[in-house]
Amino acid sequence: MSVPMLDGVLASFERRLLERTEEHRSGDLLREAIAYHFGFGEFGPTRVGKRLRPQLLFRTAFQLGAPVEATLDAAVAVEILHNYSLVHDDIEDRDELRHGRPTLWARYGIAQAINAGDAMCAISFLALTQSGAHLGAQGALSAVRRLHEAHRAMCDGQARDIAFESRDAVAFEEYLEMIAGKTAALFGAACELGAICAAADATTAERARGFGREYGMAFQIRDDLLGVWGDEVETGKRVAGDLARRKWSFPIVWALAQPDSAARRTVAATYASGRSLDLHEVEAVRRALDELAARPACERAIAQRLESLQRFGDGDLYRFAADSLR
């Protein structure tokens, strides 16, 4: 599908996203909180995410011959589930900024944000049930099951990520298992749902999920890189916030897997403090990561994941994935 045609699909997606969230919002405060998070109505326009998961779903589906209408509710479901996870993630990580403005909990309080996130999770699956008219009962049931499986994996990954915060060491394999659930699972589900929307066979759907999961691993490593060396204007979040909270991101885990050196000892000792880091300590860790060449290591890891995606083909889906990781 050409870019102009996909732009039209994305416009239809945005309308459907608004429609599905509007029809399931009831109480005034809940309606307001969800509208605020998405930037709808009086709370917009605001900078929205890149809609990467819906785009992967669309491109997978269209590459396999799915009609547009069969994909819209599935894409909406994936995006709403992703946003529900962001609402809860911001609370758990104590992030006060997203897309350059206060997060939902920072504006409405933790209790209301938890509740709004729960409602968004419910709306996600209600939206997905609407796809039955196009996918048939079996296709819709399969889509719901796959999205639930991804949701469970996301929760498992988040549990690991939270547990890591109280540890003074995390093995590289543990980090990879964590991001496979927390981040890659939903990307995998997005691509698999795209295949289901195209009525693809089980083998093709599994390959699509594999593509999405591999992409998701690369995406998280890039996100970790931006969390240390990114631009706050680009990310919409405070740069180095993950370092301040002692999050076990790719640069940190990689650095501590290197041979002994003064820079490695700086990272290890600072992360072993068991508390949040002050600005001086954050800068010390960042300098140590630069000395260890952790940023080029991140870039190599992303390139390796991207290269592995080529085994799924080098069509529009691959080109989009590659461009989005640059």
Image (cartoon, rainbow, N blue to C red):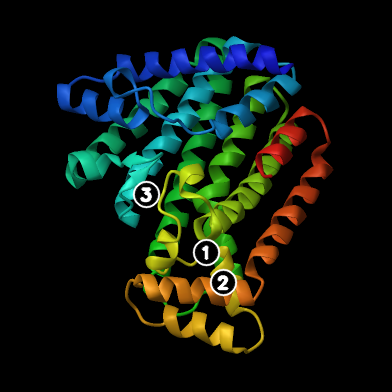
- What percent of the width, then of the height, locates residue 43? 29, 24
In front here: 204 or 33? Answer: 33
Label 2 CA crowd tier, 10 Å (few <14, some 14–19, many 20+): many
Quadrant in the picture for residue 272: bottom left
What is the three-letter code of the residue carrying label 2? Val
C-alpha span from label 1 to label 3: 15 Å
**Which residue is painted at 33% across and 39% down in the image?**
101
Q: Secondary structure at mark 3?
A: helix
Q: Is residue 209 above or below residue 67?
A: below
In front here: 257 or 234? Answer: 234
Comes first in the chain, label 1 or label 3: 3
Q: Secondary structure at mark 1?
A: loop
Q: Which mark is residue 249?
A: 1
Reading the image, the residue beneath label 3 is 89
Q: Secondary structure at mark 2?
A: helix
**Which residue is painted at 45% across and 85% down in the image?**
269
Relative to 52, is 313 on the left or the right?
Answer: right
What is the three-letter code of the residue carrying label 1? Ser
Reading the image, the residue beneath label 2 is 253
Relative to 253, is 246 on the left or the right?
Answer: left
User: Dots 1 and 2: beta carbons under 8 Å?
Assistant: yes
Relative to 20, is 287 on the left or the right?
Answer: right
**Which residue is painted at 61% across and 48% down in the image?**
219
